[in-house]
Image: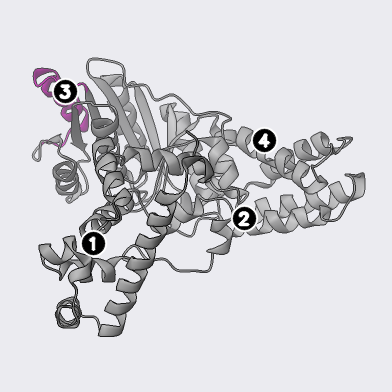
Amino acid sequence: MFNSLSEKLESAFKNLKGEARINELNIANTVKDIRRALIDADVNFKIAKEFTDKVKEKATGEKVINAISPGQLMVKIVQDELTELMGGTEAQFNITGNPAIILVAGLQGSGKTTFTGKLANYLKTKKAKSVLLVAADIYRPAAIDQLTILAEQVGVDVYSERENNDAVSIALNAVKEARSKNKNVIIIDTAGRLAVDETMMTEVANIKKAVNPAEILFVVDSMTGQDAVNTAKAFNDRLDFTGVVLTKLDGDTRGGAALSIKYTVNKPIKFVSSGEKMDTLDVFYPDRMAQRILGMGDITSLVEKAQAQYDEVEAKRLEKKIRKNQFDFQDFMDQLQQIKKMGNLKDLMGMIPGVGKAMKDIDIKDDAFKGIEAMISSMTPFERSNPDSLTPSRKQRIAKGSGKDMAEVNAFMKQFEQMKQMMKQMNNMPMGKIPGMRR
């Protein structure tokens, strides 16, 4: 995500490397490169120019304080301006009403229906809401089927009328259904088109007028860059939507939509989405996104993802086993499953400051743990609980069952033993000497 933009911005800051202070010449060179990087990322020229003019104005005359280099100061200025460009602060999401009605709009292929399922999952699991999905796309034959499948995946109900060709009446009937079943949120998935057209706009505007939604979310494919911003403007002129959703952030996106859309339509980005899994939806934080674009990582989001999977009872049980040096293969497998629930592995690594840049050319697949899982799955329950029981004949059977050779099995066993030794050493250290730990 934004790899090309991040690299070009980093290159721009090199103009200040080794400089004792900021002056008009090195500011001009840096700002020029920043503007070029933004335009290459498909940011509108007017926006790029206004952005860099603000950066130049703030940088000019700045005094470099002790222990902060000119380059670091420029990064801080750009970070602040990027944050402001993308909205400044987290936008509030309104789910008030009886029920709260959320209208989802966007072009076909933008990831609109998939987002609808993800939002239902988010509201159910993180906000404890009872959600009803509404299939109001009366044109695409598979739309109802897709929404039904997504509803089953996340465990919510879906309302549809397959024989009804009036999207407005479907939406109104769904509101009645939600009230009768005590649903406190309904999400209406509207029809998409390959391009903006009058029929589409009129229909979604009529739905809005009929149900008076608390939120109208416009879903944007972030890979379409400036085209997405232009489409957003056309929708906003008719719908006056309340927020934007950026999808497909795991793709080869240049960043133009994320950086331009708030400026263009003056509506906040509320959610960002990546991948097809139903738990890959995140609230949009402009400051965190600015940090990631500048290669600073996003430790806050990483910790939040970890906390979402944290089980205090399980953690205490695991801590006792580690202290007694009893950590086994089943424990290891359980921890792998927790990590996988946090999301795409490469994205998670990219949230660690400095790691994203180092791993930009490394392909980390979502099935990176597949081989290890296959080996552990080929063990008996006794073997998983007793790592020392693995004799050569047992290892041979595990290798055969997992489709691995003996060398791979032995290498994994060695790595597992080294990890146990490291845990043992940390447990033997006084807490005050472990980095970040204090009694």
The residue where tag 4 is placed is: 80
Label number found at residue 5? 2
Q: Which residue is mark 3?
A: 183
Percent of width and height locating residue 196: 40, 43
- For the point 24% across and 66% down, the residue is 373
From mark 1 to mark 2, how far is it between C-alphas?
A: 42 Å
Which of the labelled discs sits on residue 329, or is there none? 1
Q: Is residue 115 above or below residue 364?
A: above
Q: Tell me the amino acid under the disc marked 3.
A: Lys
Residue type for callout 1: Phe
Tag 3 secondary structure: loop
Give the residue type that dot 4 points to.
Asp
Q: Earlier in the sequence, mark 4 or mark 2?
A: 2
Q: Please report the bounds of the magenta region as a residue range.
A: 164-184
Q: CA gap, disc 4 to disc 1?
A: 46 Å
The x, y position of residue 212, in whole percent, is 30, 19
Pointers 1 and 2 in contact (C-beta within 8 Å): no
Q: Secondary structure at mark 4?
A: helix
The mark that comes first in sequence, 3 or 4, is 4
- 243 sits to left or right of 416: right
Type of the residue with mark 2: Leu
In primary-sequence order, the first of circles 1 and 2 is 2
Look at the numbered disc 1 and give the secondary structure of its residue. Answer: helix
Q: Is residue 189 visible?
A: no
**Residue 18 belongs to magenta span:** no
Name the front one of labels 4 and 1: 1
Among the two numbered marks 2 and 3 on one chain, the one whose residue lies closer to the N terminus: 2
Q: How many marks?
A: 4
Classify 10 Å Cα crowding around label 2: few (below 14), some (14-19), many (20 and above): many
Residue 156: quadrant of the picture = top left
Counting residues from the start of the chain, the first of labels 1 and 3 encountered is 3
Identify the residue shown where x is 88% and y is 52%: 19
